[in-house]
Amino acid sequence: MMVLAMKRELQNPTEEEVIDYVNGNLCRCTGYKGQLRAIHKYLNT
């Protein structure tokens, strides 16, 4: 849901903006690598 909101608010978010959006919503134990790949794939569709 938050990624949908981010896509609506930001046309072309930077890596830092994406991390700011997921911070506090996802577990950091994975380093966000898989999640960031999926988010970028979604944002580029």
Image (tube, rainbow, N blue to C red):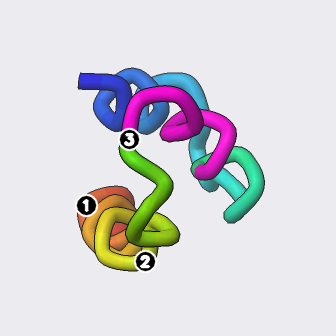
Which amino acid lies under the numbered mark 3 shown in the image of this protein?
A: Leu
* Above-or-below relation of 19 to 29: above
Residue under numbered circle 2 = 33
Query: Magenta span has 21?
Result: yes
Instruction: Choose mark 2 or mark 1, whichever is in front.
Output: 2
Residue under numbered circle 1 = 42
Q: Is residue 13 left or right of residue 43?
A: right
Q: Which residues are magenta?
A: 19-26
Which amino acid lies under the numbered mark 2 shown in the image of this protein?
A: Lys
User: Residue 17 location, x and y as percent?
Assistant: 71, 45
Label pair 2/1, CB-CB below 8 angstroms = no
* Above-or-below relation of 9 to 19: above
* Above-or-below relation of 14 to 40: above
Which amino acid lies under the numbered mark 1 shown in the image of this protein?
A: Tyr
User: Residue 44 location, x and y as percent?
Assistant: 35, 68
Residue under numbered circle 3 = 26
